[in-house]
Image (cartoon, grey):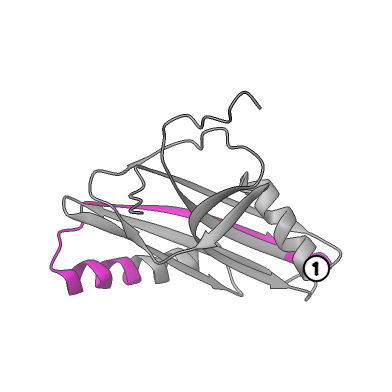
Amino acid sequence: MIYVPRLIHLASGASEGRTPLNAFDNALLEAGAHNANLIRVSSIVPKGCRFGPKPDLPVGTIVPTVYAHITSNVAGEIISACIGAGIGAEGGVLMEYSHRGPGDDAERVVQAMVEEGFARRGWTLDDVRFVTGEHKVDRLGSAVAVAMMLDPEPVNTGGR
């Protein structure tokens, strides 16, 4: 099977939780990427792919996703997760990064990563889009950034 996504949905979220997994799940909920089975994939934007809103998906849909995440239990710490989408005529790259620090610092790192990805391919970079989750930890927090790689056609659930 060959699957080439035609739609990329960028989103971010941040939240607290009782456990690291609950914090991560709650951050995914804030990003609207919950109730899907995210399969982590590498980071290439297909030529002609567009960016836009996520269509309604049945619970449990398997979705190829590029994501960055970080979890911390250090009260007062700023954490961030970022994805940069570099776009050009040939296609694009998605670069992800997370760290203990503010989102604008993460975006600067991701910008350099996108630029290197394009330079190494010999592609011309036309635009970069960022999605960044930033969080100040209360007790146990998580931040996520996701790029869900989808087919924009409606899903036929057989009337379910």
Residue segment shown in magenta: 112-141
Residue 52 placement, left or right of 100:
left
Q: Which residue is mark 1?
A: 140
Q: Is residue 32 above or below residue 43?
A: above
Q: Quadrant of residue 52?
A: top left
What residue is rendered at 52% in x and 29% in y?
Answer: 156
Q: Is residue 56 above or below residue 7?
A: above
Q: Quadrant of the N terminus?
A: bottom left
What residue is rendered at 45% in x and 67% in y?
Answer: 96
- Furthest toward the top, the residue is 159
Q: Nearer the viewer, residue 31 or 105?
A: 31
Mark 1: give few (<14), some (14-19) or many (20+) Cα within 10 Å: many
Q: Is residue 133 above or below residue 8?
A: below
- Furthest toward the right, the residue is 18
Q: Residue 87 at x, y = what percent?
A: 26, 52
Per the image, label 1 sits on a secondary structure element best described as loop
What residue is rendered at 76% in x and 66% in y?
Answer: 21
Tell me the kind of residue under disc 1.
Answer: Leu
Q: Nearer the viewer, residue 107 or 19?
A: 19
Q: Quadrant of residue 122?
A: bottom left
Q: Quadrant of residue 107?
A: bottom left
Q: Is residue 133 magenta?
A: yes
Q: Is residue 156 above or below residue 21?
A: above
Q: Residue 160 at x, y = what percent?
A: 66, 27
Residue 47 placement, left or right of 96:
left
Q: Nearer the viewer, residue 19 or 116?
A: 19
Q: Is residue 123 magenta?
A: yes
Q: Residue 106 at x, y = what percent?
A: 48, 68
